[in-house]
Amino acid sequence: DTAVSQTPKYLVTQMGNDKSIKCEQNLGHDTMYWYKQDSKKFLKIMFSYNNKELIINETVPNRFSPKSPDKAHLNLHINSLELGDSAVYFCASSPPDGTEAFFGQGTRLTVV
Amino acid sequence: GESVGLHLPTLSVQEGDNSIINCAYSNSASDYFIWYKQESGKGPQFIIDIRSNMDKRQGQRVTVLLNKTVKHLSLQIAATQPGDSAVYFCAETSTGANSKLTFGKGITLSVRP
């Protein structure tokens, strides 16, 4: 059983388009995250949600809008995609005490 | 795949040797640390963790050492195998509500057969 699953795995799109990445976790965790991994493999947190509430927004452009319909889902919508948005995006979840985060398999976004 | 011009530090070891991967963390308030392994095309996977009230923790073939004085974390892998080849990350956090994991720069471990 997949603990944290995100779709799609690959996404190729043109500049200016709007796209969404979906994430679901079946671990019963209250906290979910979005991380961005750049071409140098650096992992940086973008957002954190706790029980559907936004907790952390790490100065991400407002073209990025996370949405959490329930505590098991955290989707990422990106408007007006730019070339610099190309990266691998990871969803993760963790227990309430903020210990071990479990990661999804990643979504490789390529903006052309 | 990896991009041209990737500048991750790389540790190359012979199969069967022990590997030591080092990490300097930044926040003296961090009280929980994790090592993650990331294989190509996959998300980071938990290897081992350690809390700040400990200085050593052992798992199966892996040991994590924590030196809070110099804010240094290391991961030791015994009898390194080809399947250990991956990018390794250390991560730190302060546990509790509104916590977030902050990752260090990855280190590529390459195991020579």
Image (cartoon, coloured by chain):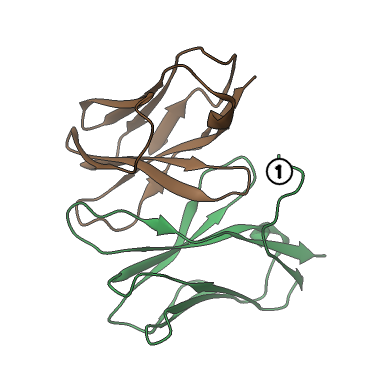
Chain colours: A brown, B green
A53 lies left or right of A1: left
Residue A24 figure quarter: top left
Query: Which of A101 and A34 lies nearest the eye of the viewer?
Result: A34
Residue A50 percent coordinates (x, y): 19, 41
State the quadrant of the N terminus of chain B.
top right
B102 lies left or right of B80: left
Residue at the spot x=37%, y=29% of the render?
A23
The residue at which mark 1 appears reads as: B2
A110 lies left or right of A96: right
Residue B20 figure quarter: bottom right
What's the chain of the residue with tag 1? B
**Amino acid at dot 1:** Glu
Residue A48 percent coordinates (x, y): 28, 42
Residue B42 percent coordinates (x, y): 57, 42
Residue B41 percent coordinates (x, y): 62, 40
Query: Which of B95 and B9 lies nearest the eye of the viewer?
Result: B9
Residue at the spot x=59%, y=49% of the render?
A41
Q: What is the tally of numbered marks visible in this picture?
A: 1
Residue at the spot x=24%, y=50% of the render?
A95
State the quadrant of the C terminus of chain B.
bottom right
Q: Is residue B77 above or below residue B46?
A: below
Residue at the spot x=34%, y=56% of the render?
A100
